[in-house]
Amino acid sequence: MSGPVRFWPQASAIARRDLDRERRSSEVVWITIPFGAVALLLIPLAIGTNEKLLRDIGPGMFWVVVLLFGVLTSVRRTSVETPAQRDAVALLGIDPAAEFTGKAMALTVMLIGFELLVGAAAVALYDIDLTGWPWLLLVIPLVAVGLAELGTLSGSIATSVNAGPALIPFLVAPLAIPLLLGATQGIEAIHQGEGIVSWMLLMAIVVLALAVAGVLTARPLQETR
Amino acid sequence: MPSATPLVDLHGIAARIGVTPILRDVDLTLGPGESIGLIGANGAGKTTLLRIVATLLRPSAGTGTVLGADLTGPDRYDVRHRIGLIGHVPALYPELTLTENLAFAARVCGIDPSRSQDALEVVGLAAAAGRRAGESSHGMQRRVEFARALLLEPELLLLDEPHTALDPAAVELVAHVVDGVRKRGGAVVVAAHDAARVAPLVSSTAEVKGGSLR
């Protein structure tokens, strides 16, 4: 019989499992990314070819699509997990906080991939002004981590109250507003020549608060399933 | 009654789902090297009792310890990795191969993942190691679950209808796994509806009927 394994090896094993499952099922690559790209493509068709308008709303549209994608992926991750699999994970002695962290890590990787691919489509379609683009190297991962934490936490809550994935959008959408505001207003602030630090700080605080909430509630949520 | 410290020691256990009573006043004691068969019809409460013994379900009444941990106390989390549960629904990840499923379990338990291949060989699935679980038959998935039990070596093994979907050759495998746990000083609980199939595996049997153990 083995002894207890530390937090990070368990978290990385969970992340590896989820990424392997995604690699095999390719749901994000073949379903969600095309869906996101199509959503960005349809918007100009709906509102016409007003280039200035498209350039103005482009970043906002992109972040809204990223938010919707985060919800969709979280819903999928929760609905594919069976009660038998959850029991098996509990009996492997996995620390629920490590499980939360590992799931959020895997979701973060998927979301960053989505943001980069769909972001490239958004730049091409909307002719987005990339002034201050180096800040995106910080904004993109922060949004991905925050949405991943939020999606994972919402999935655990939905499972614990036996509500199923239908509850997840209602949990994620309002709590994602600070992330959405931070990303859109931060980029806007750069274009206006204003400081972005306060918006980055807002996102960082949200990410930290979600991490703390996810870790602290992991055990109680697992036990009420 | 076993003389050594019991691995399972339950007293007056009751369970209900909503307002429906599932178990009432169940006592169960199991010492090292012992095994018991819980025999009963569908809906008798066997699976609920197994989940309580596995610490996955809190009883609505009663007290007890499992592997020395209080059934409802926080120390039960610390013994879970010493409990193996093979339910009647396979708990594998369909997108992962048979080896990857075992390697994941090994990794989170601090066991060398390369031992997964050895475990698959014992259950006769070495040639199918690279096949995805979702593309494997129910019987093969059951064998993988027994391979996981061989790999993780639980001190307390709980089997729910272990013969479901297994061919006659695999039935010997169940006996092999049960014997292994008992020889290591562990205990085994087998829940089934067919007493004749369970009898060779266990040292005693009890009937589960109407939520009570007789």
Image (cartoon, helix red, strand yellow):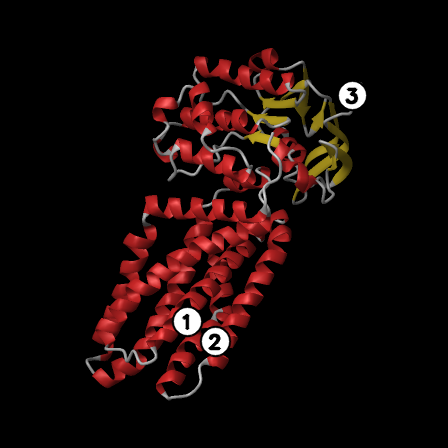
Image point (53%, 45%), residue name: A10
- Tell me the kind of residue under disc 2: Met
Mark 2–mark 1 CB contact (< 8 Å): yes
Q: Secondary structure at mark 1?
A: helix
Is residue A162 at all visible to an observer of this figure? no
Residue of label 2: A200
Toward the left, the furthest residue is A49
Image point (32%, 49%), residue name: A26
Q: Nearer the viewer, residue A215 or B53?
A: A215
Q: Give a yes or no on whether discs 2 and 3 share a subunit.
A: no
Q: Give a yes or no on whether discs 2 and 1 share a subunit.
A: yes
Indicate the quadrant where residue B52 lies. Answer: top right
Mark 1–mark 3 CB contact (< 8 Å): no
Q: Is residue B100 above or below residue B186?
A: below
Rendered-image quadrant of the N terminus of chain A:
top right
Residues at marks 2 and 1, CA–CA distance in whole angstroms: 7 Å
Q: Position of residue A191 (x, y in %)?
A: 35, 85
Residue of label 1: A139
- Tell me the kind of residue under disc 3: Ala
Residue of label 3: B4
Q: Position of residue A171 (x, y in %)?
A: 51, 64
Image point (42%, 21%), residue name: B121
Of label 2 and label 1, which has the lower sequence position?
Answer: 1
Query: What is the chain identity of the residue bearing mark 3?
Result: B
Query: What is the chain identity of the residue bearing mark 1?
Result: A
Image point (54%, 30%), residue name: B87
Mark 3, other Cα within 10 Å: few <14 / some 14–19 / many ≥20: few
Indicate the quadrant where residue B82 lies. Answer: top right
Q: Nearer the viewer, residue B11 or B91?
A: B91
Residues at marks 2 and 3, CA–CA distance in whole angstroms: 61 Å
Query: What is the chain identity of the residue bearing mark 2?
Result: A
